[in-house]
Amino acid sequence: MTTLYGYFRSSAAYRVRIALNLKGLAYDQAPIDLVAGEQRGEAYLADNPQGLVPTLVTDDGLRLTQSLAICEYLEEVHPEPALLPEAPAERARVRALAQLVACEMHPPNNLRVLRYLTGELGVDEAARLGWYRHWVHEGFTALEAMLSREAGSGDFCHGDAPTLADACLVPQVFNAERFECDLSAYPRIRRIADNARALDAFRRAAPGEQPDAR
Amino acid sequence: MTTLYGYFRSSAAYRVRIALNLKGLAYDQAPIDLVAGEQRGEAYLADNPQGLVPTLVTDDGLRLTQSLAICEYLEEVHPEPALLPEAPAERARVRALAQLVACEMHPPNNLRVLRYLTGELGVDEAARLGWYRHWVHEGFTALEAMLSREAGSGDFCHGDAPTLADACLVPQVFNAERFECDLSAYPRIRRIADNARALDAFRRAAPGEQPDAR
C-alpha cells in the first residue's frame, strides 16, 4: 500500500494529497506531527534526512521526497488523468506557476523559517505576521498578473481542468486565509481556487479532512 | 536567438546557464542588475511579473520563467545529453535533490529575503550572516546524508554524469563559499561540486565568467 508521511496543515503534503486524489490512487496516511517536532526524530530522519514532510512510500517500497518531485513521479507512472499538459511550452507554464508557489511563496513562510524568526531573531508576533503576509502578497501579485494576462489560463490555472499548478495554488490559498491575508486584490486566484476546491479530489485533500486534523 | 535574462550571481540563472551549456545550446545574455533593482523596473516586469531572474526567451519567442521549469523544458525539447535519468524512480531522486536546493536552501537566502531581514526587520550583519549559514547548514546536512547513503550517487549527484541536481548543487556551493560557510562537514558535496566544476559547461557558467560580472 502507498503511504504518505505528512501533516494535515503542511502545504507540501497537501499538494501531494491533491495529486494522489486527482489520479484516483489509494494511500494510507502516516501523520508526522511537525509542531511536536516528529520530523526531527531519529526514526523519521533515518528515512528522510531532510526532516521534512511529505515522504511518499510507494507500494514497491520506493521512498520519495520533495512534493513536486513526488507529483512528477506520479505523473510519469500514472499518466491519467494528466497533471501536466502535453506540449512542452504549456508544461513549462504549469511548472512555472507551480514553482512560483513552491519555490518563492511557501519557503520563506514555512514553519521552520517562522520559528527561526521568532526564536533566534526574536521577531515579535506583529512582525512575523507582516513577514508572512509580505511574501503572500509578493507572490500572489505576480501570480494574479500571470493568470490574468496569459492566454493559457481558464477555469483553472491552465485551461479548464486541474493541473499541478492548482495542486500548489490551493494549499497556498488555504495558508493565506489561515493567516488572514487580504485576498481582495486577487480575484482570478480566488475564482480558480474556488473552482478547484469544489472538486472532490481537492475537498478530500483539505487539512480539516485529514486523520491528524485538530 | 535564445536569450537569457539573468544576473551573474543569481544562482537560479546560474543553474540555467549550466543546463544550456551541458546541452550545447547557444544563447545571448541580457543582464538584469538585481542589486540596482532592474528586475523591478517597468520594462522587465511587463515581461516577467514575478520580478525575478532568470527569464529565457527562446528563438521562437517563448518566454519561460522559473529555473527548474526552464531546465525541464530544455530537457523535453533538447533531450540529449539528458539532465534526468530514464527511470521514473531515478528521475524522482534527481528532482528531489535539485528541489532540496531550489525549494529549501536557496529561497530563504535569496537577495530579496535578505533585504527584508536587514531592512524591515532591522536584523544586523552578524545575524544576517548567521541566518544565511543556518539554511546552508540545514540543507547541506540533509544533502550530504542523501548523497552518502543512497545508492544512486556517484562522481556526480546521480551516477557519473551531470544531471539537474548538479546544476542546482554547484551554484549553491558557490553561494556557500561566497558567504564563507564552513563546508568541512560535507566531503561528498565538495567532491561532487569539484567534479562538476572541472567540466567546461560548468566552468563557462560560473558567475565570474559572465558579461555582467564585476
Image (tube, coloured by chain):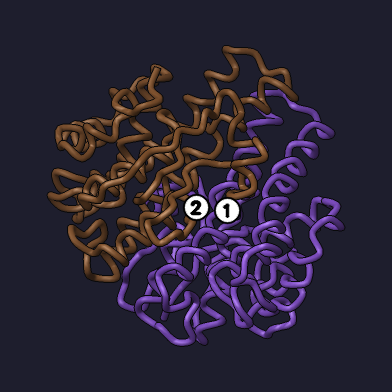
Chain colours: A brown, B purple
The residue at the point 53 percent across, 40 percent down is A107
Q: Residue B26 placed where, x, y %? A: 50, 84
Q: Residue B202 placed where, x, y %? A: 66, 77
Q: In this view, does A207 lie above or below A49?
A: above
* Residue A70 appears anywhere in the view: yes
The chain under label 2 reads A
Q: Residue A200 placed where, x, y %? A: 16, 36
Q: Do the residues labelled 2 and 1 touch (CB within 8 Å)?
A: yes
Q: Is residue B106 above or below residue A114?
A: below
Residue marked by disc 1: B100
Instruction: Give whichever of A183, A175 is nearer the camera.
Output: A175
The residue at the point 75 percent across, 40 percent down is B134
Which corner quadrant of the image does residue B199 belong to?
Answer: bottom right
The residue at the point 42 percent across, 47 percent down is A100
Q: Quadrant of the N terminus of chain B?
A: bottom left
- Label number found at residue A65: 2
The residue at the point 24 percent across, 45 percent down is A21
Q: Distance between the residues labelled 2 and 1?
A: 9 Å
Q: What element carries label 2?
A: strand
Residue B126 is left or right of residue A15, and the answer is: right
Count up the numbered dots: 2
The chain under label 1 reads B
Which corner quadrant of the image does residue B203 belong to?
Answer: bottom right
Residue B10 is left or right of residue B89, and the answer is: right
Which corner quadrant of the image does residue B208 belong to?
Answer: bottom right
Residue A198 is left or right of residue A183, and the answer is: left
